[in-house]
Image (cartoon, rainbow, N blue to C red):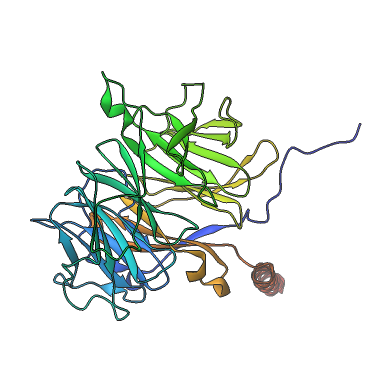
């Protein structure tokens, strides 16, 4: 019988988190006090946008990506909403276009100047009016340009074509109505949404803690898990592996995206202070789980082979994060071996801290090992010389 090890060696086993120094962070940002489980931050290679606390309406900051250091208290903002801003997302096809949703029941599309925000922006490029209650989240379509999804407290999921010439758009291109129980209507409220790689499927979780797969074109529900033991908060498509990942407050579950009848993998985690935000990198197949309300980010590697999920490492910080933004791959510093970058919102310090996930090169590791060996050899030689000197009569 041949011996077979159950240990799976990963080329990303040495990945580690490197937080930016204070002077390379964004200091003095009045981060929103909203209690919604959103990210409140969105980044692209040109700008980073952060939802801020504001009296008498809603606003968010748009800072040039290299504008680090202290942010002036009266820095110009985007402040055209009459209610608190709940979510912001950059257009993946246009680095100068950003969408925002608010408690004022509207979604707005903003055009950001290439030089940045030099004065307060109060007039939106487009205003989308179709929800009757506050809009909780928005998501851009991954492959269709100018297609935006919005979800609100009226239990509707709307798809908008923002390329229309009208400044005010009142008719969405598609309406998805969630099933509403007559006794518990709030259970139809969506908590998270995720498109698959081509945008043909949409995974959602609602307040009843169940995962559903929708067809956004037809506006129909395709799949609902039979098992109701897992209480899902967030859901994420694992593109490239044909899987779905759902997270609760202390559990992660992996599903076959074509069959939700039974989970592929389940694992209970130690208690988190809040919601677990999942982030996935399809190029490296690394999964990041960031806890809201604590400073920890767990790193896993996913695989199509059992057991599918392998724990690699964990970044720990004493400063809790309220939300996180993620830099797209085209904005990473590949020369520094950066494979992922977060923007941690640390509300207790009014700080936006970039956190780079680094995979060190083999050459760098070899060089450090050689230096360590040389240093150890010199130390040993000094000890021998000292012993010889002491032994002399």
Q: Position of residue 335 (x, y in %)?
A: 57, 75
Q: Position of residue 115 (x, y in %)?
A: 30, 81
Looking at the image, which is closer to me, 40 or 364? Answer: 40
Determine the image quadrant of residue 309: top right
Is 6 on the left-hand or right-hand side of 213? right
Q: Residue at x 40, y 35 (%)?
A: 205
Q: Position of residue 262 (x, y in %)?
A: 58, 25
Whether residue 277 is visible here, answered yes or no, is: no
Whether residue 114 is visible here, answered yes or no, is: yes
Above or below 334: residue 132: above
Determine the image quadrant of residue 244: top right
Looking at the image, which is closer to me, 50 or 390? Answer: 50
Is 292 on the left-hand or right-hand side of 386? left
Q: Position of residue 34 (x, y in %)?
A: 21, 47
Determine the image quadrant of residue 7: top right
Furthest residue to the bottom? Answer: 115
Furthest residue to the left? Answer: 56
Number of marks in picture: 0
Looking at the image, which is closer to me, 7 or 334? Answer: 334
Specify the quadrant that holds the C terminus: bottom right
Above or below 255: residue 315: below
């Amino acid at each position: 019988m041949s011996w077979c090890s159950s240990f799976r060696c990963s080329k990303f086993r040495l990945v580690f988190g490197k937080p930016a120094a204070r002077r390379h962070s964004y200091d003095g940002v009045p981060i929103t006090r909203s209690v919604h489980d959103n990210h409140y931050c969105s980044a692209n290679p040109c700008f980073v946008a952060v939802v801020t606390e504001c009296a008498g309406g809603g606003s968010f900051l748009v800072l040039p990506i290299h504008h680090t250091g202290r942010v002036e208290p009266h820095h110009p903002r985007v402040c055209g909403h009459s209610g608190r801003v709940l979510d912001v997302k950059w257009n993946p096809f246009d680095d100068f276009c950003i969408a925002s949703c608010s408690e004022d029941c509207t979604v707005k599309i903003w055009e950001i100047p290439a030089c940045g925000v030099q004065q307060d922006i109060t007039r939106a490029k487009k205003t989308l009016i179709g929800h009757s209650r506050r809009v909780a989240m928005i998501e851009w379509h991954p492959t269709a340009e100018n297609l935006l999804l919005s979800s609100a407290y009226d239990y509707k999921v709307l798809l908008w074509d923002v390329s229309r010439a009208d400044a005010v758009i009142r008719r969405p291109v598609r309406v998805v109505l969630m099933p509403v129980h007559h006794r518990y209507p709030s259970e139809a409220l969506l908590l998270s949404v995720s498109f698959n790689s081509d945008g043909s499927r949409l995974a959602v979780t609602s307040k009843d803690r169940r995962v559903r797969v929708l067809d956004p074109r037809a506006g129909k529900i395709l799949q609902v898990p039979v098992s109701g033991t897992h209480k899902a908060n967030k859901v994420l498509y694992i593109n490239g592996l044909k899987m779905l990942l759902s997270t609760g407050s202390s559990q992660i579950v992996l599903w076959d995206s074509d069959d939700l009848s039974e989970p592929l993998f389940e694992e209970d985690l130690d208690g988190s202070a809040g919601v677990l935000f999942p982030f996935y990198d399809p190029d490296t197949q690394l999964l990041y789980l960031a806890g809201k309300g604590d400073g920890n980010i767990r790193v896993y590697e996913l695989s199509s082979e059992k057991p599918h999920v392998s724990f690699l490492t964990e970044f720990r910080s004493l400063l809790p994060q309220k939300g996180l933004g993620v830099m797209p791959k085209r904005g990473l510093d590949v020369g520094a071996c950066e494979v992922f970058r977060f923007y941690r919102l640390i509300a207790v310090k009014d700080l936006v801290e970039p956190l780079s996930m680094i995979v060190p090169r083999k050459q760098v590791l070899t060089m450090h090992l050689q230096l360590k060996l040389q240093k150890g050899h010199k130390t040993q030689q000094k000890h021998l010389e000292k012993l010889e000197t002491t032994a002399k009569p």
